[in-house]
Image (cartoon, helix red, strand yellow):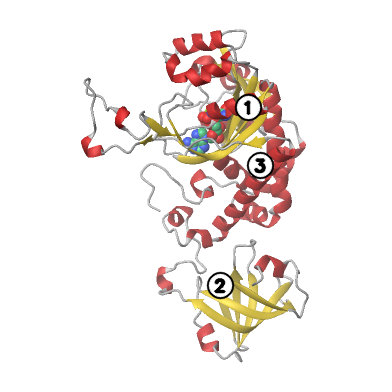
Amino acid sequence: AHTPVVDVLKGQHAVGDTVLVKGWVRTRRDSKAGLSFINLHDGSCFDPVQVIALNTLNNYDDILKLTAGCSVSITGTVKESEGQGQALEIEAQDVEILGWVENPDTYPMAAKRHSIEYLREHAHLRPRTNVIGAVTRVRHCLSAAIHRFFHEQGYYWISTPIMTASDTEGAGEMFRVSTLDMANLPLDDKGHVDYSEDFFGKETFLTVSGQLNVETFACAMSKVYTFGPTFRAENSNTSRHLAEFWMIEPEVAFADLNDVAGLAEELLKYVFKAVLEERRDDMEFFAKRINKEAISRLEKVVEQDFVHMDYTDAIEILKNSGKKFEFPVEWGVDLSSEHERYLAEEHVGAPIIMKNYPKDIKAFYMRINDDEKTVAAMDVLAPGIGEIIGGSQREERLDVFDRRLDEMGLNREDYAWYRDLRRYGTVPHSGFGLGFERLVAYVTGMQNVRDVIPFPRTPGNAQY
Ligand code: 4AD
Ligand code: MG
């Protein structure tokens, strides 16, 4: 088997050893002394390895035609590098060219840097860039750390369904799933689409959240979480919304709002530490190119306690800030991203756990507080991005829950299975949803969630 570039650079092979490496040319330059320097990357770490090809190689003429993007298989000797940069390099004994770039002018990677918007439209090019490579490794590291955290804490991972008839957030922003013939829809006597003829016999959607499902498992297995894709047809063309995003949703029985606020803080600190330890190379790139504070702010965050704040107090702070916000502030309004960012960035300068929102701006399942006006909800607001977590204590009292459904004009029958959970051995329970792309954007300092997911889905964009 061949050796990953990361193993060569980390000195897993002694100087003088012969190694076989495979990858893509990032850059190549020639020296007058009759040698060519190839920077070879294979995705295994941030840095490429430098390969020296001497003009004594039998295919040297071809080597001189290698351009960015060509794929090669190289056998060579590990050497101490005389140049700056890496300590180790490879002197080639054999350079096999696997794939040419058919027209270097149409593979615009070379020295020039490309806008992140340009890259979104070039599926074959995007993952080969420094920035998307770094994002991809950090994303992987975060995902592995999240699973490790929950495993170590005794949580079970529950896969919740992607196709479902229930609307968890009650916001109606769902993608419909159907096998009906769109050109010839069956209608009932009122002229509405007759979904009884559809595959599931019912109107069905892509899930917006696994929460309602995972609650049933929390109320049996005690500590559980989901980690999967979720879908929202909200037509918001912003830098923090995707139509398809991944969410991590822990759900804990016998836990109240403060318990899961503590869990959120522990989880975030754990994964930040993992990235700082395991992906130093990529984080240094983000600190150099994307956000100067990419490393220092994470180091600070893992050391300090998160600030807890009540929604009602936040409204007072915003009112007294002397700032002119696009959306005016008064008790009862939902916090806009502008408000969230002011609080997290300027007022506190660290992540905030915002709690106890007015019930009218929150979902039907949240537990009503004693004041009857607010619910036991929490959002985690991070500097630079705003809300990264939304969660709550769930309403476990059937009579209170039914009153809330009535108040909101929701149908008890549609929530029959969810109501059953409150009829048979109900317990206090709480949970939250962490938006994975918002987390990756926060950690890397990337400005737009579209650039931290391999294939972004946004209004008008689902080509590849
Ligand atoms: O606040 P949300 O809507 O909460 C829920 O879905 C709850 N059912 C979670 C729970 O309590 N189990 O979404 C949770 C998080 C947000 O804080 C945000 O980080 C992310 O999901 N999110 C999005 N990320 C990218 N694009 C979108 N369109 C998003 N909508 C929500
Ligand atoms: Mg929310």
For marks 2 and 1, give the one nearer the viewer. Answer: 1
Q: Amino acid at mark 2?
A: Thr
Residue at 45% across / 74% down in the picture? 101
Residue under label 1, please give it.
218
- Label 1: how many Cα within 10 Å (few below 14, some 14–19, many 20+): many
Q: Which residue is mark 2?
A: 27
Residue 204 seen in render:
yes
The residue located at (63%, 88%) in the rendering is: 33
Q: Position of residue 110 (x, y in %)?
A: 50, 69
Q: Which corner quadrant of the image does residue 166 belong to?
A: top left
Which badge, 3 or 2, comes first in the chain's sequence?
2
Q: Secondary structure under badge 3?
A: helix
What is the secondary structure assignment of the residue under circle 1? helix
Which label belongs to residue 18? none
Task: Check whether the beta carbons of the residues at disc 3 and disc 1 lie within 8 A of each other.
Answer: no
Residue type at mark 1: give it: Ala
Residue on which the image places disc 3: 146
> Is residue 239 something one can see in this rendering?
no
Residue 223: x and y in percent read 67, 30
In the picture, the quarter occupied by the N terminus is bottom right
Precedes in sequence: disc 3 or disc 1: 3
Name the N-terminal-most of marks 2 and 1: 2
Give amino acid for label 3.
Ile
Separation of marks 3 and 1 at Cα, in angstroms: 18 Å
Q: Residue at x 60, y 46 (%)?
A: 445
Spatial separation of the CA atoms under disc 3 and disc 2:
36 Å
* Looking at the image, residue 67 lies above or below residue 428: below
**Alpha-carbon distance for marks 2 and 1?**
52 Å
Locate residue 243, reporting x and y percent. 44, 39
Q: Which residue is pictured at 57% across the width and 58% down the height? A: 133
Which one is nearer the viewer's eye here, 215 or 95?
215
